[in-house]
Amino acid sequence: MYCNYCNKEIIDAKRPKGNTDYSKVYRSSEHIIQNAIGGRLESEKICCDRCNFHLEELIDKSFCDIFVPFISNINNFKKTNNSNNAPKCSGYAIYNEGNKNKMVFADVIKKSKVKKSNELIKIEKEAGTKNLDERIKNCLNEMRVAFKNFNLDNNYFKQGISKIAYNYAIYLGINIKNISNVCDVTLDSENKELISINFNTIVIPFVPGNAFDDFLELHTKFTLFHNLILFRYGKELWCYINLFNTFQFYVRLSDNYDDGENIRYKIYGQEFQYMQSNMNTNHNIYSDIIMEKAKEYTASGYKYVDTLSYNFYIKQNKLNNYFRIENPLRKFDKGEYEIIFYPWWIIQAKDKEEIIEYTTKKYIQLNQYLIKDNPTILDSELFSMSKEDREKFVELYLKSIKSS
């Protein structure tokens, strides 16, 4: 077996302790969705131990850091490694200063508790050095997190989500030769170690294209899950990725894929994973969830017999995943109708503001779910701040929402 990144032959054993001969590579288990964000599906058929190590440094760490503000608020967060290691992030918090609420920057937030605030320390020092350490400790204990920073770096995000799609395709047995053109790697000259990597995939955000999908995504009970679907449309190989039931994207892995079958549409595999459960992937449970939502849709006055969604297809009141995107939208162009594949339709029919608006709604939905037992900030606390702090809070909060 060969590594799909460095192409070295993998020794079918774990690397001996203390072995630093990196010209040889050993077996390693790689997570499809990064374990740090709750991914539990893994495989030893993707990469060697050295590339696994380098991928963590080159892509995974920066990608996973984007999601720390959410992960730190998820109760019963399940992953396979370091389950007790709570992630840290930064943000803003409020505390009482002389019977007035003040907002300060929190440098370290862990499990929704402020662990460090240099701005707080500076304020308290200016008030005097008497009992300084005790005062700071008491303030930290009483501070409440207003909101956490969420900085979506487009390049790190694209690389991380493309890696998920790439690894999932390999996991499902897709020949690496059919998708290798989207992954550029650079190896060093001595031991052929991975020193840089770039995925040049096309990444398109999902947006509901009809009332049915809009209802399913924005008007039903929110639950936390990850979802992957690898499929072919014509000669294009795509992976639909949904992280935290919020960050939804199509990733194109090939524009000239041929598996020898003369069919227009095919699903190669799909995974569904709850975020707050030890349950393994269970397609029946996912199907049940979708059908329950479809019944809610019917109860709202709509019919769902033969209803098309762009994530699945309901025909004769039964869920049929293998008809997903089988009937793409049509676009009127120069007096004629033409069939357009759904991700391409999103790019043509939806402007940037519409995409941002939907993504923002999903982001707010996630935030409301995570803080349902810990409200961000009470009205009384907001209005007890100074005018300057209130304006600062609103400005920064709106900025954090829009950054998604």
Image (tube, rainbow, N blue to C red):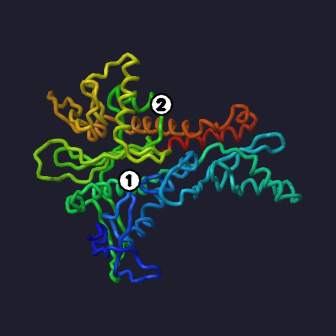
Q: Is residue 269 above or below residue 53?
A: above
Q: Residue at x 73, y 36 (%)?
A: 381
Where is residue 246, by image quadrant? top left
User: Which residue is disc 2 drawn over?
Assistant: 221
Q: State the CA–CA distance, disc 2 to disc 1.
A: 26 Å
- Dot 2 lies on which element? loop
- Among the two numbered marks 2 and 1 on one chain, the one whose residue lies closer to the N terminus: 1
- The amino acid type, in three-letter code, at marker 1 is Ile
Residue 294: % across, % down: 36, 26
- The amino acid type, in three-letter code, at marker 2 is Lys
Q: Is residue 378 above or below residue 195?
A: above
Residue 178: % across, % down: 20, 59
143 or 85, which lies in front? 85
Left/right placement of residue 225 relative to residue 389 reads left
Badge 2: residue crowd in 10 Å (few <14, some 14–19, many ≥20) = few
Q: Residue at x 39, y 71 (%)?
A: 49
Left/right placement of residue 198 relative to residue 125 reads left
User: Which residue is disc 1 drawn over?
Assistant: 161
Residue 351: % across, % down: 36, 37
11 or 374, which lies in front? 11
Picture disc at residue 245: none
199 or 390, which lies in front? 199
151 or 232, which lies in front? 232
- Dot 1 lies on which element? helix
